[in-house]
Amino acid sequence: MRIPSPTSPIAITHSNYKANTKRREWQASLSLRFADRRNATRLVHNEHKGPLRVLKPFYPEGEVCHTYLIHPPGGLVLGDELNIQVECQAGSHTLITTPSAGKVYNTDNAIEQQKQHITLTVDGSSTLEWLPQETLIFNGANTVLQTDIQLEGDAKLAFWDIVCLGRPANQLPFDNGQCLQAISVNRNQQPMLIERNMIQGGGALQNQRWGLNQKNSFGTCLFTVNSERTEREAWQQTLDDQFGPEHEWGITQKGELLIIRYIGNSASICRQGFQQLWESIRPLLCQKPAVAPRIWAT
């Protein structure tokens, strides 16, 4: 699924575009900073514009700060743009998730995009676990989902990103529109992972065997841990046995980055598999047992 091309989105133009086109949009931004205060991680900076916020921090495991991102409109429509910036200062440990799936609705035209740009900065001696629920891309959407992660020093990361194309529960495929997913991970300004997937509704990447092979859901899960081959084979076998051959998993080690892939027809199964791996790998990442956010049980 990796396409070696620039991570910056390609602008979409239309010969009939008019400068005075009326825009309907929610411009929203959220800037968060976490810091260690008296042996517990505190949310020390919380600035938002528009309908993008956080609930109060939760501490189900003591010093680790669990935070839920809230987007009241429930999804992105024509021209919407969400910008999320998270900074984890030295010594902090933060887990960020969402209470429900994100949604990207269909657009009225192919001119304007719906954009989500996430920037995660993790200082040395800190840990960030970015574990949102899936993003649903409705048929006819024209979206850019971009995540840039900067790790400093010995910063630790657990991350996943899950995308579902169309609304399979309603038997509505994704055969029109496009979704650009870009993920970059750097440590000390040096690239660890650069990915860019441009999926056209009904296009080759969606349908061919070398791409999604006509599957509607895909996910990427990352951990900054070193694993043994026997561990990876055991995790792979467990996933294959539990979920069956119709769900494809891949687990590889690239340098210090453990990379898990999913392709299948269920974003829910993808999230279950990622959570199961997170529960197994978290003690290797930060020497703490997994404590699931309470909102996952609701």
Image (spheres, rainbow, N blue to C red):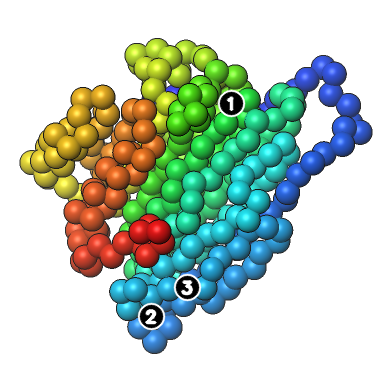
Residue with the mark numbered 2: 40
Q: Furthest residue to the bottom?
A: 38
Residue 57 tag number: 3
Which callout, 1 or 2, points at the residue further toward the start of the chain?
2
Camera-nearest label, 1 or 2 = 1
- Residue 93 rendering spot, x and y as whole percentages: 37, 69
Residue 44 seen in this snapshot: yes
Residue 139 tag number: 1
Q: Amino acid at mark 3?
A: Pro
214 in relation to 116, above or below: above
| SS under mark 3 | loop
Residue visible at 48% across and 55% down? Answer: 98
Q: Quadrant of residue 240?
A: top left
48 in relation to 222, above or below: below
Q: Quadrant of residue 37?
A: bottom left
Q: CA distance from mark 3 to mark 2?
A: 11 Å
Q: CA distance from mark 3 to mark 1?
A: 35 Å
Which callout, 3 or 2, points at the residue further toward the start of the chain?
2
Q: Quadrant of residue 90?
A: bottom left
Check disc 3: other Cα within 10 Å, few if <14, some if 14-19, many if 20+.
some
Instruction: Tell me if 164 is positioned left or right of 74 in this view.
Output: left
Camera-nearest label, 3 or 2 = 3
Check disc 1: other Cα within 10 Å, few if <14, some if 14-19, many if 20+.
many
- Residue 159 rendering spot, x and y as whole percentages: 37, 50
